[in-house]
Amino acid sequence: MSMSTAFTIFVKKMLREKRIPFEVSVDPFYSEQNINPLKRVISEIESGNAKLEEHELIEV
């Protein structure tokens, strides 16, 4: 399927349904619940107060 054909299908479906034909959501990585601990850790690293520990690597 060419890009032109795919876009045409998308536009026709959008016009027919009067909506974007897929769900739009926010990446949970950027949620406040995740960002606040990341900011805290960054602050600890930048201030030199980070408690760094060696650990075994987990292979997947």
Image: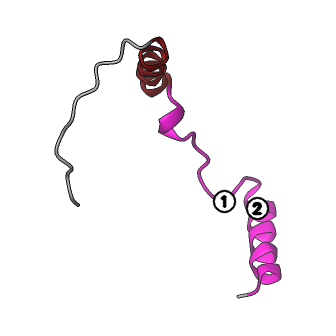
Residue at the bottom extreme, as displayed: 1
Which residue is rendered at x = 49% and y = 17% of the image? 46
Residue 12 placement: quadrant? bottom right
Write down the residue under mark 2.
Answer: 14
Which residue is rendered at x = 62% and y = 47% of the image? 24
Task: Report if residue 44 lies within the magenta region.
Answer: no
User: In x, y percent, where is residue 20?
Assistant: 71, 55
Q: Is residue 51 left or right of residue 25?
A: left
| Colour setup of the view | secondary structure
Q: Is residue 31 above or below residue 19?
A: above
Which residue is rendered at x = 22% and y = 29% of the image? 53
* Foreground residue among 41 and 52: 52
Which residue is rendered at x = 53% and y = 32% of the image? 30
Q: Is residue 50 left or right of residue 31?
A: left
Residue at the front extreme, as displayed: 48
Task: Look at the numbered discs 2 and 1 and tell me whether their residues touch, using CB distance below 8 Å.
Answer: yes
**Element type where label 2 sits in the image:** helix
